Amino acid sequence: MCGIVGLFLKDNSLSPRLGELLAAMLVTMSDRGPDSAGVAVYGPAADGNAKLTVQSGTPGADFETLSEDLGEQIGARVGMRRNDTHAVLSVPSAKASDARDSLPALRPGIRIMSDGEAIEIYKEVGSPGDVASRFGLGEMSGSHGIGHTRMATESAVTTEGAHPYSTGADQCLVHNGSLSNHNNLRRMLRREGMRIESENDTEVGAAYLTWKMLRGRTLGEALEDSLDDLDGFYTFVVGTRDGFGVLRDPIACKPAVLAECGEYVAFGSEYRALAGLPGIEGARVWEPEPATVYFWRH
Amino acid sequence: MRSYDLAASGLRGLNRELQSLNGSTNQTVWEITNPRGSHAVAVGLDAPVEVVVRGSTGYYCAGMNKQATVRVEGSVGPGVAENMMSGTVIVDGDASQYAGASGQGGLLVIRGNASSRCGISMKGIDIVVCGNVGHMSAFMAQAGNLVVCGDVGDAFGDSIYEARLFVRGAVRSLGADCIEKETGPEHAEALAGLLARAGVDAGPEEFRRFGSARKLYNFDIDNVAAY
């Protein structure tokens, strides 16, 4: 099954409430995906700095002196904001790829959830309500966010099996469905130099889109391409630094509802997820067409 | 009128009360407030009562309906009026996938659009959609009438048996064994009756009729009496 929620704010009026609204949407989708949950939140960016969100199963030991150790390694000042099993590292943009490359040797137990100027990804095993509260999602602000509640089918119930997946700077993907040609695509994409860290089908979908965009396609075009190259069932919701996209496969048996009004575009696997949004009574609510790319940008 | 606040009092209590109505009560008009996309609202009714849902619902609204009239003042999720036996279900907004699936009788009216697989495996239900329907609608439709006032998506009427399909707008593509057929006076009369019951202001002459070519290997017209 799985549940997806997404909220893309068109102006700043609701930005302080992004996390609160997204958390409420996520919790309504708990019975579609009770085993794990995750969110990507596009928050305020600091000029000249990149953010790396990292996760550890032993955060006490791994995070203790991480900012100092990493700073020494890359020769730059590293900021760190700890949040439960996750931490957001802030490094000068020019040093972001150094930092990324240094982390595995410095802290073998750490997983990199995302990197970019705005994106932060938090995901864990557990009920969506527990996951939202342990990370304080309700207090987060931002311009857009995507959440996922998982009922595992294609890979184990683990942190790395949870969504969202990020395979490129400020990009993320969540997925309801299952891809059937992910093993073949994973081999091809790894040959092409793409970074794919799990055995999960969705991560392959994310890497495919990143690979297409590295070759000059826009997100909208990459999504169009995926209709030819990805086999299986999918409703995708994707985020970029300033964009938000939705795509359903041509059979479209995975549910999807979109709502749009003056303040936001919202996505839910079901209308229940949208029912609590401010102004939903006046919003245009519709089911996205199969094999049709929907995309909004700031 | 009896009013039931779904957010305050819960789904099980609602369906228990509605299902226990047996035609001997004076409480024949019900209003359900705060549905907020809930699943399985007003399912399994078997009494000549009127139920109005003030808002949008989720999966399986008014499923297995018998006798009752259920009106939704909003949109519905997948599987509205699934396996309806009799009565009337009216949706003021849109319907998601497989509206009226496997329905054996009664009338389902959707004032907006219905998405994919509308009327899949219908077995005698009448469905009137004022807007468009999505792909694979009337898949394996066995009996009853599907009236679409707007356009129809891909693979319309695939593997259809003996249901009658009427379309006013464009058909993107027909499914296997579904063909356009002549509209005889008996079809026009049935269609006019359905349009009137659904409150649609259109004439039967504006519609084209589609049905089974009866060429699929597992269906031989000589065996029609067996179906």
Image: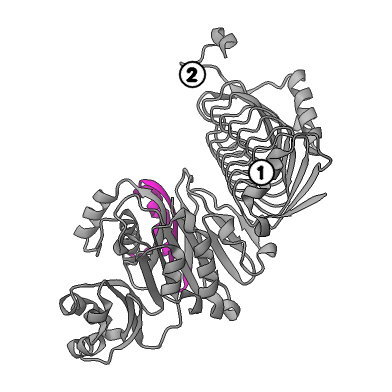
Residue B211 inside the magenta-drawn segment: no
Residue B117 percent across, percent down from the top left:
55, 38
Instruction: Look at mark 2 in the image and give the residue it sits on.
Output: B216
Q: Residue at x 55, y 7 (%)?
A: B222
Other residues around mark 1 within 10 Å, as few (<14) / some (14–19) / many (≥20) = some
Q: Residue furthest left?
A: A105
Q: Please state which amino acid type lies under the numbered disc 1.
A: Arg
Give the image location of residue B103, x and y in percent. 62, 31
Residue A229 shown in magenta = yes
Label 2 sits on a secondary structure element that is: loop
Residue in the foreground of this view, choosing between B145 and B25: B25
Left of A166 or right of it: where is B183? right
In the image, is A74 to the left or to the right of A116? Answer: left
A265, above or below B107, in the image: below
**SS at mark 1?**
helix
> Which residue corresponds to the image point at 20% horizontal and 87% vertical from the top-left?
A69
The chain containing the residue under callout 1 comes to B
Residue B50 appears in view: yes
Q: Is residue A211 left or right of residue A192?
A: right
Which stretch did the figure color magenta?
A215-243
Q: Is residue A40 above or below residue A251?
A: below
Answer few, some or many: residues within 10 Å of disc 2's Cα (few below 14, many 20 plus, some between 14 and 19).
Answer: some
The amino acid type, in three-letter code, at marker 2 is Leu
Q: Position of residue B188 (x, y in %)?
A: 76, 24
Which tag, 1 or 2, sits closer to the chain's start? 1
Say which of B187 and B208 sits in front: B187
Q: Is residue B131 visible in the rendered structure shown here?
A: no
Residue drawn at the location 56% of the way across and 33% of the way down? B120
Q: Disc number at residue B16? A: 1
Is residue A180 shown above or below A295?
above
